[in-house]
Image (spheres, helix red, strand yellow):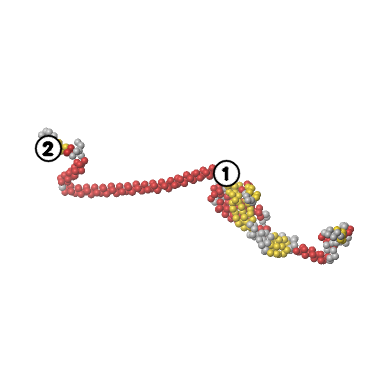
Amino acid sequence: MGFFDDVKLLFTDQDPADTEEDEVTDINQGQKNSGSGLFSGLPIWIILLVLIALYLSTGVYKVGPKEVGVVKRFGEYVRQTESGLHYHLPFPIEEVHTPKVTKVRRIEIGFRTIDPGPPARYEQVKDESLMLTGDLAIVSAEAVVKYKIKDPIQYLFWINKPNSTVRDASEASLRQVIGQNNINDVLTDKKTEIQLEAKELLQNLLDEYQAGIHINNFLFQDVSVPEPVQDAYRDVASAKEDKQKKMNQAQAYRNQIIPEARGEAAEIINNAEAYKAERIAEAEGDVARFNQLLKRYHQGKEVTRTRLYLETMEEILPEMDKVITGEDSNGVLKMFNLDKLKGGTE
């Protein structure tokens, strides 16, 4: 007979022989012992006390070192307990939840881990990974979000399906931030900044939901262009690199040629200034000499004319062939070629 059959027997006058065979075989001794109830011969109040004690003992529970206990009474939160042994009123009066508040949970966006490996194997979830950038380009973004419980009461009672909630909020945050940046920033320069912005946006969103969750990390697993357009994107990227290279070369040539041109211009200006100063000095000297000559001319005109004539001849004659003629030639021109005497030409 079972436990509940014994209890039934306590509250009825039915003979057990009337319903079932009351003899069982003792395997060890090979004897037949008469069947009897578990509580046969015990007063009913003792049995009730035992049952009540068993029922009350179900309220003993243990909270682990990485957990907190959250006790509900008729579905309403009443208290929170720390690690150790505790007691709550048995079900259905009270029940307890023991979430692990120090455990770091992981959410995958845009992919799922098939086998952690090594080597690890992943499966892409295109409905989550394909996102639109601010310049209307499509990128494939995969990210990992790590979080833990910071408020167990909010975590248990304010949100439904925490993992799904965090995944949906994370995807929405990432889509919003990527949609505010162009494709080049998403793929290269601003990846770290985008991760931080997405993390901050996600944390604010969960705080607004009163989810009781703290975001530890929001990191890209992979960010790339979708496979069907990778070749076209490489061509565009190559063209942009060539453009940037040409611009850099032009800038370098500009930086080189402008100083050279400025140096040449400065040299020309300096030469012109020097020539100007030289010409002015010469002109001023000529004016001074002319004024002195004019003064002497007024003092003695014939003397001055003769001196000027002689000085002029002195400058001219050394460069010319010279022939001397006599005054009394009697009709015959007598010439004396001085150049032949010194080996000159006629």
Viewer can see residue 164? yes
Quarter of the image with the C terminus is top left
Quarter of the image with the N terminus is bottom right
- 342 to 38, vertically: above or below: above
Looking at the picture, how far across and down is residue 237, in whole percent?
Answer: 53, 44
Q: Amino acid at mark 1?
A: Gln
| Secondary structure state at the residue bearing disc 1 | helix
Q: Which residue is mark 2?
A: 327
Q: Amino acid at mark 2?
A: Glu
Q: Is residue 107 left or right of residue 269?
A: right
Q: Which residue is mark 1?
A: 230
Q: Is residue 164 left or right of residue 253?
A: right
- Residue toward you, 336 or 143: 336
Residue at left 11%, top 35%? 329
Q: Is residue 191 left or right of residue 81?
A: left
- 216 to 265, vertically: above or below: below
- Residue toward you, 93 or 22: 22
Q: CA distance from mark 1 to mark 2?
A: 111 Å
| Secondary structure state at the residue bearing disc 2 | loop
